[in-house]
Image (tube, helix red, strand yellow):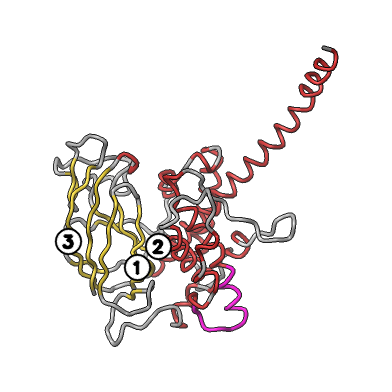
Amino acid sequence: MLRTAGLAIALLFAHPAGLVHAQSNASTEARQHGYEHGYRDGADRGRQDRERGLGRNFRDNDYLAGARDYDPAFGNRSTYMSGYQQGYTAGYDDGYSYYDRPGQYGQLYGRPSSQGREAPPATRQSAGRSPDVAFDAGYRQGVAAGQQDRQQNARSDYRRSPAYRNGSTTYGSSSGDRNGYPQDFQDGFERGYQDGYGRSRYSSDGGGYFPNRGTTGAADTRDGAGTTSRTLVIPATRQWTPTSITVHQGDRIRIETTGEIRWTANQAERARSAGSLDLKKTPGAPMPNAFAGALIGRIDSGRPFGIGDQTSLVAPATGLLYLGINDDNVGDNSGQFQVVISW
């Protein structure tokens, strides 16, 4: 009994300090993870506003869009969002001035650990968020590869990197869907490489895109075949789906969409590409003034734009095209859209 009492007393006095230390580390990681995500999103938004000839178009509540991507695996929500807001603000300023000054990608995504090795990417552990695990891992390695090629004055080509070609080797038991992991990793690697190499230099260098065999317009960057169309499945349960198609501002692309989704758990809440058949809206959606469940798009992490049942649209910015579902909670959705994009 005395030994047990002594152990209990020791734990009583030893536990608070350890707990505070653990909580402090967790808080730091949540804030850092939020800052990294916010910086990346803000830089994309700022760069696109500059390219579109807009004045500095940052609003204090722009960062709130990041709240939709929050997952409990990130840590404390308010701490994560505090970091996200700070990162978004800094990223927007750097992105808007990307011709004048380099971004902070190397400092943020190549942080050394206490052992002197590159810190592992912060990841989401929940299965529903598995694409972000792969994207973060690829993005961090892409930044490092892009910086290395730029420092060596090599022409940009993210496909040359063994890490890009062998992305599936970084898969772990907590990484979610094994089948989807390689494409999500390569998507993140491509994005990170562009940021690490420098967006303005990457665009003018020309090595990062496969040619389109004499045609103009979007580039099919995943397989390098230079095809002029791609068929995609856009699941209602995923907020944003990468198309693996790089567009340039002003490109005109054609879209054919079929299919129907349920945008809530209620089977009566149906939507086609134009949105809710009952003409309903949801305030927390990426485009709250558009109909719920509609097909929407974005370029990199830029501002979302409506697609709906349009058969043609002009790319508003340069970058990787994503297609998504206009809903505030995709976790209870069902169904999918089938989309054919051509140019």
The amino acid marked with disc number 1 is Ala
The answer to whether 228 is drawn above or below residue 28 in the figure is below
The answer to whether 34 is drawn above or below residue 144 in the figure is above
Q: Secondary structure at mark 3?
A: loop
- Residue 82 included in the magenta stretch of the image: no
- Cα separation between marks 2 and 1: 9 Å
- Cα separation between marks 3 and 1: 18 Å
The answer to whether 80 is drawn above or below residue 8 in the figure is below
Can you name the residue that lies furthest to the bottom here? 214
> Which mark identifies residue 92?
none
- Corner quadrant of residue 210: bottom left
Q: Report the front residue among 186 and 309.
A: 186
Percent x, y of residue 300: 40, 62
Residue numbers of the magenta segment: 144-157
Percent x, y of residue 276: 18, 44
The amino acid marked with disc number 2 is Asp
- Cα separation between marks 3 and 2: 21 Å
Name the residue carrying label 3.
310
Name the residue carrying label 1.
317
Name the residue carrying label 2.
300
**Mark 3 or mark 1: which is in front?**
3
CB contact under 8 Å: marks 3 and 2: no
Question: Mark 2 or mark 1, which has the lower sequence index?
Answer: 2
CB contact under 8 Å: marks 3 and 1: no
Q: Callout 3: 10 Å neighbours few (<14), some, many (20+)? A: some
